[in-house]
Image: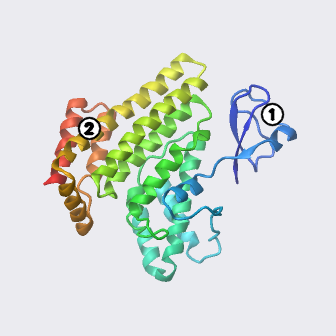
Amino acid sequence: MAILTLTCPGCGKSTLIDNEDEQSFCMHCGNRFEDLALENAVPLEPVVEQALRLCGAIGDEPYEPADFSGEPWYPQVQEVETMLIEGDPEGAADRLAGILDANPDASSDIERCMHDMVAGWLVDCIAEGDSYSGGLADIARLIEEYGEDSGPNMLIASLFYAIAQTPELVRVGEDAAVVAETLFNLLLDYPEVEPDIRMQLEMCTDFMHVSGLLVDQADGLCEDDDEMDEVRDWIYALQDFVRIFGDGIFDACEVGEERLDQLTQQWLDSDISTIGANIRDIADAYMDGDIDADGAKAKVKECLDLYLN
């Protein structure tokens, strides 16, 4: 299956179609696409390829995802993906660890296969109107190498930036909220696998920029003011927490570069996250209305103080 994008000759809006569908219709106006229109469809920029380029795993040569379907371990990796989709990230991590232990000579291929599956899953989530809900951190820790220079943190960061740089994923106004929430959840996964809080701050800054662009995209696609208000309010709520988290990191960085370098090395040596899941818990409480902005700020500071001490 390939996801294609084209401009509807009926309403002039951009829409997505599946190249395996025998009949394709515009998601905006319902116009049925004839053969001529389908001939003008172009593939959506592959998010998997973008992610790999951004993490430096491939050079300038065209990237083709490898076909591992004939490998004996492939069905087991599919089970990991299924567990992740069904909301069992810890079980998925345990399953993947067992597969890697049982196939040490194929670990690089298994990691690459898992990376590609996850990237495809995120795109499928968005294409179906659902946001990614979190859990990659559990398996990212197991992907020690992918290419020469990448590690667990690169899986999440590269997918974040790949999706952020794929505006074609936003076809209707509501998609902007879905993409923003996907990026938000990837951002919340990141502290569990990224030892340097300066890098976490960078992702917070980039989220604020990209989410602002998503609001602008939605504004150009929403024909109903109430729908646009809902999209805007949701993205602004996500921004509010990211601003709280980013401000907390910025304040924590006042300890100086040398101290932060020492903390990063300490984090790597101990191989544990001191922020990670706690930040997600605070974000969930804030988004659910269980704590206000001041409460979220205090809890974020408490988490960062644990890291700094």
Give the image quarter of residue 300: top left
Q: How packed is label 2: few (under 14 Cα within 10 Å), some, or many (20 or more)?
A: some
Of all residues shown, which one is farthest toward the right? 35
Residue located farthest toward the left when viewing the structure as drawn: 309
User: What kind of residue is marked 2?
Assistant: Asp
Q: Is residue 263 above or below residue 22?
A: below
Q: Does label 2 or label 1 sit earlier along the sequence?
A: 1
Q: Which residue is mark 1?
A: 32
Quadrant location of the C terminus? bottom left
Q: Secondary structure at mark 1?
A: loop
Residue at 64% in and 49% down: 45
Query: 105 and 259: which one is in front?
Result: 259
Distance Cα–Cα, label 2 vs label 1:
49 Å
Does 248 sit left or right of 214 as displayed?
left
Q: Amino acid at mark 1?
A: Arg
Residue at image coords 24%, 69%: 269
Q: Which residue is identified by label 2?
A: 247
Within 10 angstroms of label 1, few (less than 14), some, or many (20 or more) residues? some
Q: Is residue 292 visible?
A: no
Residue in the picture at 36% in, 42% down: 204
